[in-house]
Amino acid sequence: MMISRRDTLIGAGIGAGALLGLLGVGTAEAAGPTGYAPEDFFRPPTTSDAALSPAGGRVAVLHADKTGAVVQSYMDIIDLGRPEAPPRRIPLGNHEASEVAWASETRLLVWVTYNVAPKGMPDEYIRRVISIRDDGTQPVLLFQNRGKAVFYVHDLGRLIDDLPDDDDNVLMMAFDVNKEMPALYRVNVNTGDAVVMEYGIPRTNRWFTQNGMPMVRLDGSSDESLVKVLARPPGASEWKMVRTLKIDQTRDFHLIGAASEPGVFFVSARMEGEETMSVRRLDLHDLSYGPPLLPRADADADGASIDHQGRLRGVRYATDRPGYVFAEADMPAHFGAMEAYFGNQCGIQIVDADKARNRYLAVASGPLQPGAYFLYDKPSRKIIEFGQRRSNLAPEKLGAMETLKVRTRDGKSITAYLTAPPSKAPGSLVVLPHGGPESRDFFAFDEWVQTLAGQGWWVLQPNFRGSDGYGLSFAKAGWGRWGDRMQEDVEDAVQQVLTERKLDRSRVAIMGASYGGYAALMGPILRPDLYRATVSIAGISDLPDFLSWKRKTDDTADDYGVKFWTQRIGDPATDMARLVQASPRRRAAELKIPVMIAHGFNDQIVPLDQARNMAAALKAAGRPCEYLEVKRVGHPEWPESQQVDLMNRCVAFLAKALA
């Protein structure tokens, strides 16, 4: 989700006293499984987060029970010396608690979300952080001394640095309503008072710090699609440019966190002439990069695990089930034990570890496992589970996924994921190309996939050329190939599945969001014999118009945004005929199947006109479509209620078309 440069809420009449007053409410009885309607996949998690105490002896776990529209949240404090003993339970009230962190050995931070919209109006959420003692006493609202901020700022929950050597303070980022720009604050966790350390610019997205000092800043562009990386090493007074990158499209550079050496940060980067992303050190003094750390040649680095002392634990790689290359020689065997515990069907993400690296807090997730929080103890090789993200979903009633190798028509190979309906009975197929397009799908739990599979449909997710995670050459193979090679890869995956699984060739639909929405519109134009219905969510429909809009709105130095999209899509100056042919709006009369279009009114990545003009072109061609324009949402990660409404509409639309 893009970060707004001005996260303000006008007239949200809720203050510090009202927020703290919600904390004394007890918990309700847990709601049992209620079925597999879309709302069951998008409801608040039953276990939303877990955190390991600084000394490594306790774990705080956030849970929630939902009865009807009421959510009751609570936190369990588990003593790892006596994990079988009843935990200390702290009620948190009738709202959603989403994150937890230890501010010190005796005080915790809890992130809470409130819907402040008047009854009958669209949801309007604000996020706040409560500091509370480990016995449930002395709750304090952070930023409570900032007056207007408590009332008007959407998000007062952006933690920048937990300051592990300071038990009294943390660093947080929030919008200053007086200066009308983001600021970095030092916040006292005992009193809630926040003091400005420094201001950014109106489009600052975040800071990165080392030992409490801000040394890297990310500034966004006006359309929120680009970000400038600025550095200010120790001893410097001015910010200097590191690079400009496309925030939602390319993974050629990503800041991870501070290393132990002064002025040095870990980044994942793809250097000139290199095929894959790797993790390395960046020295802010001279902007020099170190060699790849814990490299792997066959996949892109997808992040890293570093401890509070700035030491590298391991590098995570974008494989089907993301895995790590570890700094410690014995960790692969221990990590393998974690994977085996979950049947080698889950990706494991390490969340934290104690200073001795004997206890690892992690979360496991896979197609049949929405998320399980657990602790792995190295000396005993034991696992302690703390809770499931969605305990209302029974694994045996979800759709099982498998990884496919697809042979393309030009003799290459791509990866795709096929999810069967719980019954595994042959039937309809829904193709779900991902967005980006420089993104990718994984062997993982996906709410959209499971919602569709729950209707008795098979779901196919192809990682067509242009996807990331497979190296630069694979990504570049999709540049300038919208409407041909990338669509052909999708078609080849569909044909292989239809043949091998003997699915109904007359009942195939395609659905996607962002670039996936474009592919969903273009696919049936190129292959009218293949698809029976299409759903486009926040999709591009006219490539020349989109590039023209980019030229008008790009405020980046040297027209970086325009150059980026021209490289990925094509240059109208030299390639206009192909761009027109690859634009669904220009060929709307060829769409002879049922079409559904959905778009967020406030979308800053793909303008709303792309949807409106596509719907108008279909109407002019005598091809009416089902059109949904969602107020007050962007691109396209929408709040829970809008997600549920969207999926209900998509399911109803596809069910009618595929009947």
Image (cartoon, grey):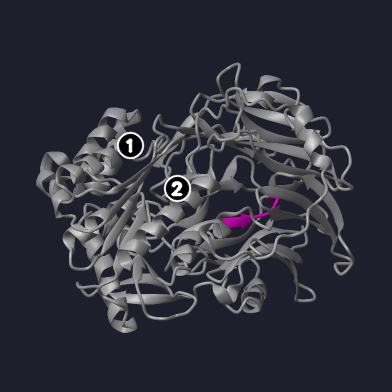
Q: Is residue 308 magenta?
A: yes
Report which quarter residue 594 is drawn in.
bottom left
Residue type, mark 2 in image: Phe
| 110 over 4 or under it: above or below | below
Q: Which mark is residue 537?
A: none
For numbered disc 2, what is the local secondary structure?
strand
Query: What residue is rendered at 78% in x and 62% in y?
Result: 356
Mark 2 touching mark 1, by CB under 8 A? no
Q: Residue at x 52, y 70 (%)?
A: 367
Q: Residue at x 44, y 57 (%)?
A: 277
Residue 476 or 526: which is nearer the viewer? 526
* Any part of residue 570 in sight: no
Q: In this orientation, which residue lies closer to the viewer: 474 or 409?
A: 409
Q: Secondary structure at mark 1?
A: loop
Q: Which residues are magenta?
A: 304-309
Instruction: Tell which tag, 2 or 1, sits nearer the viewer.
Output: 1
Number of other residues with Cα within 10 Å of mark 2, as a class: few under 14, some 14 to 19, many 20 or more: many
Q: Which residue is mark 2?
A: 253
Q: Is residue 129 left or right of residue 554?
A: right
Which x, y percent locates residue 285? 54, 37
For this orientation, the residue located farthest to the top is: 178
Q: Residue 212, image x and y in percent?
A: 69, 36
Q: Position of residue 385 (x, y in %)?
A: 74, 68
Q: Amino acid at mark 1?
A: Pro
In this figure, which residue is indicated by the disc labeled 1? 607
